[in-house]
Amino acid sequence: MQENLFDVAVIGAGPAGIMAAIKASERGLKVVLVEKNSILGKKLLLTGNGRCNITNAEFDLKKLVQNYDNGKFLFHIFSVFGPKETIKFFEKIGVKTKIEENKRVFPTSNSAKDVLNALIEHIADKNVRIIYNAEVVDIILENKKISKILLKNREICAKKYIFCTGGKSRSLTGSDGLGYKLIEKLGHSIVKPMPALSPLELKEEWIKNLQGVSLSSVGVNVFEGANKQFSEKGEIIFTHFGVSGPAILNISGKVGELLESKDVKIYFDLFPLLNNERLREELGNNLQRYPKQTLKNVLSKLLPDRLAEVLIDVVGLDKNKRGVCISGVEKNILIKILKNFGVSAKNVYSFDQSQVTKGGVFLEEIDHKTLASKIIKNLFFAGEIIDIDGKTGGFNLQMCWSTGYVAGESC
């Protein structure tokens, strides 16, 4: 049975689990990495649309944590292993990186497979035993310590355990939420898992007429009743069912929370860099410049054609009316919708459409410096299983690398 005795057992071989196993092994510990799939890092291959957005080069820790829900929990962890250390780590194992728009960091090869292969080669040099196609079916607890974990056809005993089983997003990669059930059985609280970084479905039927229309810089303001809840700014893309794009993905988790008990309205500011007066001047200039053209054609000089037509229909104006005939009242109506184009949120798309999970192990039950459980003496957490989710742009992978590193070192 000696072959089943380890210093550290890491459950889940995603980004956090791989990093945790590497770091624990570098401390001279005998480590086992338990993975339910037949390969390591299956979900990693999907990140960054296959390019792997390794991290975000935001080196100011105060600004960095602002990109996460519950980000303050990560402040110490990022001070130990943050974006700078992540970039150096990957450079050291042979992954050269580049910084793109919005400080997103990618491998120069633009290949997630290259990142995963480098990790696999690196972990092969460590004292890590990897068990594939292995699913944890039970955890045996004695005196508030895990004594062993049971797989379908074997058991694993270790001095310490790191759970990196992920969330519920993209279940085909193995993130099916089983880890939550196992952790609840140990007495931990789980904040309800919900899809995040996911497209939104809207109630308006006419939204399908905008399918494929994208806008590069839009202000997104979310209201519950008359109360503004939060806002975002960035690219949006209309779909046949609603809206997506980075700005939408970043707010989807919070919208999902609101939709649990409230009606949610989203207002798009289509010209966030222009105030009402400046936009009125811009519109007026176009109407004067093209007095014989229809309202639709004039507005299309400011917006994509289909969006211009939909907006005119929504406010009930005559799209064929000549620019010279547009009244001051009609201009005000147009300004209002251009700065406050309202839609009604219906639903956040499912876990299979989401990139990450919002919710997870309750943070007050985890030590913010070591990631050790405050309930179970020899248990640690890392990655998406904990109740932290970040914006798009490399932030969620950075959380996985950092928490994996710290949990592995803490063991």
Image (cartoon, rainbow, N blue to C red):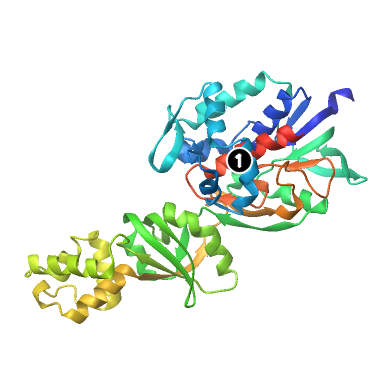
Q: Position of residue 166 (x, y in %)?
A: 65, 45
Q: Residue furthest right?
A: 143
Does residue 72 appear to the left or right of 318 in the view shown?
A: right
Q: Is residue 35 above or below residue 385?
A: above
Could you tell me how many numbered marks the image carries?
1
Q: Is residue 82 above or below residue 28?
A: below
Q: Position of residue 336 (x, y in %)?
A: 30, 74
Q: Residue furthest top?
A: 125
Nearest the eye: 257 or 335: 335
Residue flagged by tag 1: what amino acid is it? Phe
Residue 235 seen in the figure: yes
Q: Quadrant of residue 146?
A: top right
Residue 290 seen in the figure: no
Nearest the eye: 108 or 114: 108
Say which residue label 1 marks. 78
Q: Is residue 121 above or below residue 107?
A: above
SS class, disc 1: helix
Q: Position of residue 382 (x, y in %)?
A: 68, 42
Nearest the eye: 171 or 395: 395
Does residue 289 appear to the left or right of 156 in the view shown?
A: left
Q: Quadrant of residue 204?
A: bottom left
Does residue 8 appear to the left or right of 247 in the view shown?
A: right
Q: Is residue 127 above or below residue 402?
A: above
Q: Quadrant of the C terminus?
A: top right
Q: Quadrant of residue 161?
A: top right
Q: Position of residue 63 (x, y in %)?
A: 51, 48
- Residue at 58% over, 65% down: 257
- Residue at 13% over, 65% down: 286
Q: Quadrant of the N terminus?
A: top right
Q: Local crowd at mark 1 within 10 Å, few (<14), some, or many (≥20)?
A: many
